[in-house]
Amino acid sequence: YSRQEVKVFCSPNNKKLFTAYAGPNVEIIVLPKKCKYIRFLVTNRYIRQSPLLFAVWEKLLKTTWYPWILYFLGDYKRIIEQSVDVVHFPYPELDRYDFKIPTVISLHDLQHKIFPEFFTQKDIKKRDIYFKKSAQLATRIMVSFQHVKDDIVKYYSIGPEKIDICGLGYDNESAIDTSGFFGIQKKYGVS
């Protein structure tokens, strides 16, 4: 058994956030500053939301000079694909839809389906577009609880075999003292 290598990709301004996690099996890779321009283009929500702009974008993808533009701008997709076997996005959306390596997303919940009264119609529509498309295209979906898995199957018609439950971890040393919980439960009649 050998330990897996983890590579964290981040922008230059986020490097400090991840430095504490670097170690023998964890490498922090700072993407070149110029990557932000191509990232803006390929992840731009306005492009992905507009059928016309997205159609133009897809045609551009098929041109022969497009890869050279990406290369010049520092296509972070290429950097990631050459560095790892699988990429995990710790949020509910794929950063882009054209990765050639396996992708994993963490879809934490579908609150907008369960409690729509707390979201605007615009937010519900955006969440449904991006969460569903990402769930469909991701190789695997990671959730924290069974009810989230059930919601994804129910609302997005994603097969349950594609969804893995990975419980939330905690740090034993900073665990919360639960000795007073029973008194609080009794006081408020919570069981």
Image (cartoon, grey):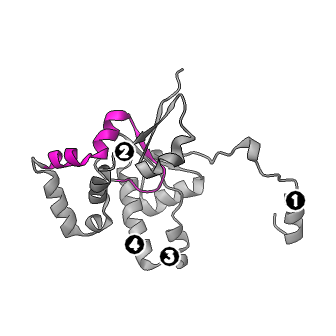
Marks 4 and 1 close (CB-CB < 8 Å): no
Q: Residue at x 47, y 57 (%)?
A: 153
User: Are there few (<14), some (14-19), or many (20+) residues within 10 Å of tag 4?
Assistant: few
Q: In this rendering, does residue 100 appear at all?
A: no
* Dot 4 or dot 1, earlier in sequence: 4
Up the image or down, 129 lies above or below 97; here it is: below
Give, as a three-letter code, the residue at label 4.
Lys
Looking at the image, residue 186 sits to the left or right of residue 85; the answer is right
Q: Earlier in the sequence, mark 1 or mark 2?
A: 2
Q: What's the residue at 57%, 45% (across, down)?
A: 166
> Residues under labels 1 and 3: Cα distance?
34 Å
Position of residue 60 measured from the top left corner of the image (x, y, whole percent): 14, 56
Tell me the tag on residue 182. 1
Q: Tag 3 or tag 1, which sits nearer the N-term?
A: 3
Judged from the image, the secondary structure of the residue bearing numbered disc 1 is helix
Q: In the rendered image, which residue does mark 3 sit on?
A: 119
Who is closer to the viewer here, 101 or 165? 101
The amino acid on which the numbered mark 1 sits, given as a three-letter code, is Phe
Residue at the image point whose x is 53% and y is 41% from the top: 19
